[in-house]
Image: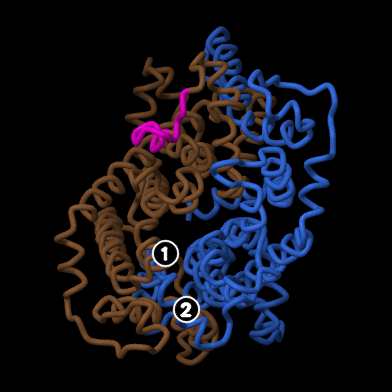
Chain colours: A blue, B brown
Amino acid sequence: MNLLRRPWRLAAEASALLIALVVAFPLYWMVLSAFKPAGEIESTEPRPWTLAPSLDSFRRVFGQQDFGRYFVNSLVVACSVVIVSALIAFLAATAVTRFRFRFRTTLLIMFLVAQMVPVEALTIPLFFQMRNFGLLNTLGSLILPHIAFSLPFAIWMLRGFVKAVPEALEEAAYIDGASRARFLWQILFPLVLPGLVATSVFSFISAWNDFLFAKSFIISDTSQSTLPMALLVFYKPDEPDWGGVMAASTVMTIPVLVFFVLVQRRLVSGLGGAVKD
Amino acid sequence: MTSAPHRATRAPWLYLAPALVVLGGLLVYPIYQLGLISLFQYTQAQVSGGEPTTFEGFGNYSALFSDPEFWRVLLATVLFAAGCVLSTLAVGCALAVLLTRVRAVPRLALMLAALGAWATPAVTGSTVWLFLFDPDFGPVNRILGLGDHSWTYGRLSAFFLVLLEVVWCSFPFVMVTVYAGIRAVPAEVLEAAALDGASQWRIWRSVLAPMLRPILTVVTIQSVIWDFKVFTQIYVMTNGGGIAGQNLVLNVYAYQQAFASSQYSLGSAIGVVMLLILLAVTLGYLRLLHRQGEEL
C-alpha cells in the first residue's frame, strides 16, 4: 500500500526514523548512564557516549541487600498472575462465547464495567482484607489483587479469539467422541494461544509494574518486597544515586523488554484480532 | 456471530466459577467495603482498636466537598487526564498512519522503539525521565540551553514533565492498535480514495476514521481510564504530589489521606468519588456502543 509519491515517502521514512530515535532515547540514556563511571554521571556536561564503561553501578545495585531476592519476588508475582489469570480468563471467555445462558449479557457488561474500576482506590479496603487474612507482607497480597484486576480485560480480549474458532470444529470433535474437557484443553486451548499471549502482556506489565500495592501491603518484612521498592532505595529525591537508579532501572526493564520482543508479532496480530472481532 | 450450540444450564457457570469467585472476593467485596468505610469514622485510633468506629453517614463527604483543596485536586486531575488522553491519541494515531506509509526498515525501527517505551515499567520510566530533565546532570537542559532550570519546581512544568512521560509510555498501545486496525482496512478502499484525489487528511477523516471508529472508541476509553488514575508517575516524579501538594491528583491525594495521615474514611470517600466518575464514563461508553448497534 504505497500511496505516497517518492519524495514524500522518503520524508515520511526519515521522520519515522527520527521519531524512533527520540522514542528510544530515554532507554538509551538509561542503559548508557548505568554503565558510566561515577564521575561521568555527575558531570554537568553530559556526553551521549562513554569512554570508560564501568560495572560499578551494577555492583552497587546487586551488592545491596536482597536485590536478587526482590528480582525473584517480582518474577514470582508477575508469572503467577499471568498463568493463573490466563487459565481463569480462558474458561470464562469460553463460557460467555460458546454458551447461551441467562444473565450472559449482564455478565459481559459487568466485565466491561469491572475494567473501569480504579483499582488504586481499592487499596484501602484491600489493605484491611489482606490484614484479616494474614496476607500482609506476603507475595500473596500482591498476586491475588492483580489476578482479579487483570481478569476482566483478559476475558474481554480473549472473547474475540474464542469466537473465531468455528462451531463446526467443536461439533466435529464431539462426533469423533471427544469429551467436552478434551475439546476444551486439546483443541480450543491451543487455538486461542496467540490471544492468550497478547493478553498475558497486559497482565504481566500490570503485575511487574505494581508500585502502589507493594508500597502499601509490604510494610514490615522487606524481604517480601519487589523491584520498584528496591529501585527507590537508590532514588532519594534530595540526593539521588543516579548511577544506581539507572542500573536498577535497566535490570528491571530488561525482562519486560525480552518478553515484549519474544511476543511482538503475536501482540500486534493479537491486538488486531481482539479489536476486529 | 454464529449461534452457540449449547443451551446447557450448568456448564457455563462451572466455567465461570473461578472468575466469579476471584472477582467477587477481590473486586466486588472491596468496592462494598470502600463504600462502607467512607461512611464511618475510621482513623488510626479505630484501626488499632483504641476507639469504637462510629457511623458518620455522609459526614466524610461533606467534609471533603467543603474542602477547597479537594476541588482544586479534582480540577487538576481532570485537566491533567484530558491533556494526557488528547496528546496520547494524537501522537498514537499520527504515528499509526505514518507506519502504514513507510517501508519495512523504518517501520520496524519505530515499532521496536515504541515497544521499548511500552515495556518500560512505570517506576523506571519515571526515574529515567527525571534524570533526562535533571537540572544538573540531565541532557535535555543542555540540548535546549536551559541552564539549571528545574522542571519539577513549577506546578505547570512539573505536570508537563509527567505528561510527557505518560504520553511516551502510553502512545504505543494506541499506535499498535490503530495500526492493526488500519491494516485490516482493504487496500482497494484507500487506493480508490487516493485515485479520486483525496488528500491524506481527507482520507483519514472521511475513510479511515469512520471505519476505525470501534477501535478508536476502545483506545479512547482505555486512555481515559488509565490517565485518570495515574499514580506511580505523579508519586515518583513529583515526590508524592509536588511542592506543597501542587501536583496532587485524586489517586495520590487519596493515598496520602489514607496511608500518610491515617484518614482512611476520607481516602475511601475520595476513592468512591473516583469510582463514580469512571462509572459515568463507562456508562456513556456503553450507550455509545449500543447506539452503534454493537452486539456484546
The answer to whether B42 is drawn above or below residue B161 in the figure is below
| Residue located 67% across and 21% down the image | A46
Q: Position of residue B178 (x, y in %)?
A: 48, 40
Magenta residues?
A: B149-160
Front-most of residues B96 and B236: B236
Most extreme residue toward the top is A7
Circle nearer the N terminus (1, 2): 2
The quarter of the rendered structure image containing the N terminus of chain B is: bottom left
Residue that label 2 marks: B26
Give SS at disc 2: helix
Q: Chain of mark 2?
A: B
The quarter of the rendered structure image containing the C terminus of chain B is: bottom left
**Is A248 one of the magenta-colored residues?**
no
Q: Chain of mark 1?
A: B
Give SS at disc 1: helix
Name the mark nearer the viewer: 1 or 2: 1
Residue that label 1 marks: B260
Q: Establish whether labels 1 and 2 are both on one chain.
A: yes
Front-most of residues B44 and A272: B44
Marks 1/2: CA distance? 24 Å
Q: Amino acid at mark 2?
A: Leu
